[in-house]
Amino acid sequence: MNTPTTDAPLLQVQDLRIAFDGKEVVHGISFNLAAGEKLALVGESGSGKSVTALSLLRLAAHARCQGCVLLRDTAPGAPMRDLLSLPERELQGLRGDDIAMIFQEPMTALNPLFTVGEQIVEVLQLKKGLNRQQAWPLAVKALADTGIPEPERRARSYPHQLSGGQRQRAMIAMALATEPRLLLADEPTTALDVTLRAQILDLLADLQRRTGMAVLLITHDLQMVRRFADRVAVMENGVLVEQGAVNEVFAQPQHAYTRKLLDSLPRRDVVEANPAEPAPPTELQAEALRVVYPVALPGWRGWWGRGEFVAVQGARFSLPQGRTLGVVGESGSGKSTLAQAVLGLLPSQGTLRFGAAGEQGWQGLGTRNTPAHRALRRQVQVVFQDPFSSLSPRLTVEEIVGEGLLVHEPGLSVTQRRARVAQALADVGLGEVQFPGLLARYPHEFSGGQRQRLAIARALIVGPRLLVLDEPTSALDVSIQKQVLQLLQQLQRERGLSYLLITHDIAVIRAMAHEVLVMKDGQVVESGPVAQVLEQPQSDYTRTLVHAALD
């Protein structure tokens, strides 16, 4: 289909329908994108936003697309081209040139066998017809434009040698090296820390202003939309339910689903400390906690010995019974290493004490398979970040949730164990009424939020006193995140559980934590009551984290 370009938008999507194996997943959506405009396509997982973006360039494998995706031609007066009906060869010329794409996870999107500079050079050779000598300085300049320090050296680095933020910048440099007219950004900051998210958003906004390109941002992060986009389009179950200017939609949402998304920010519902009552007993205490990794020494010194990298240095904290201690910091700050030390998964120095009796931690247990070790392991359980990768795909729900009972209560009969599993599932809101044959199902049959509930049930079934929550909601949509946090708050109130909460999300800290530790480069730079630390931060680093979350 060809359309005159008089006052036409850069991109015009008309009645787009997408189906897989005869099942339609996107139902006749339409939207426009003007040159130089920033449009956010918002929705939860399964809403159809990512498959829509991929289908614009016919990159969704095995998808059957109907409708029109019209792109304005560069030549004045030329008709608009329908991307869905273009020959593949012609469409290949547009991909990466007129329209570029940034994917969600740079580590999987970048080729690990080539340096980032070589990968940008390859794009310039294919799309601009340059030789390597001509393309290399342009590749270095593209990296420099994204703010990567020492761009000449980083251009010669492989993806695994760069940090998460640097890898995302390298992918942005690759996408923008050809000066596209339209950039498709699919969850470009989901895997990044809060400060890196702010940096990448500022970078995209600056590059967009300088180049005049249009941006279609795919995300479920409403704070990102508020900060970055001009207009927003909201998708639910493959239907575009609302669109308009960001300020108008956020201030006066017309559709119930939009209101639900905007109402999904974490809410605080915890038992607050009462100064008039006696302080609860201490559940976990650490003094001078230190975790060290051995590293190879450079040069000939590596033949005779090994050096050390101090991942956690001198951490000191106390967690009362029935309370939550939040640990916040960027990637590499040492917060996850601290959690692994508390779980006994990494050797540590210093003192760790558990429970009101002050029993010595892992250092005092000697051999790991002693009865004392198993007893302590039962009291300290963990819920991991990604519920899909932490649940075995080969085990049923009954086997996953009941596995801990085989270790800690081996005398239970099959009937008793099954009853305990069913009760643990009911406690986290999963039952046979909603899911017939629940115990015989496998993890892939559940949504992300439901899988996280399974992970929580697996931790709770052995009756722990302390849960280590390692980024328990970062892989979930905003509304599912809210549900999981409400469940954790309810369980804490009912059972007096103590939580060690590891996260980089300040909003989750505000909702869940009583006390907070702020970590940077393996050290605790600030600690105290959550309101005090977040409302009146004393450290420049804490202020940076808080401001990045509020912007």
Image (cartoon, rainbow, N blue to C red):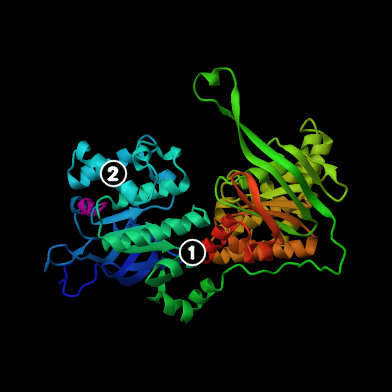
Q: Main secondary structure of the magenta part?
A: helix
Where is mark 1, residue-wise?
221
- Residue range in magenta is 91-96
Left or right: residue 143 versus residue 191 is: left
Counting from the top left corner in percent of width and height, residue 352 is at 77, 43
Counting from the top left corner in percent of width and height, residue 511 is at 65, 65
Where is mark 2, residue-wise?
139
Counting from the top left corner in percent of width and height, residue 95 is at 25, 53
Residue type, mark 2 in image:
Ala
Left or right: residue 488 versus residue 213 is: right
Asked if 332 appears above or below 233 in the picture, the reply is above
Is there CB contact under 8 Å for labels 1 and 2? Answer: no
Asked if 337 appears above or below 199 in the picture, the reply is above
Residue type, mark 1 in image:
Asp
Residue nearest the observer in this picture, 449 or 287:
287
First in sequence: mark 1 vs mark 2: 2
Residue nearest the observer in this picture, 171 or 69:
171
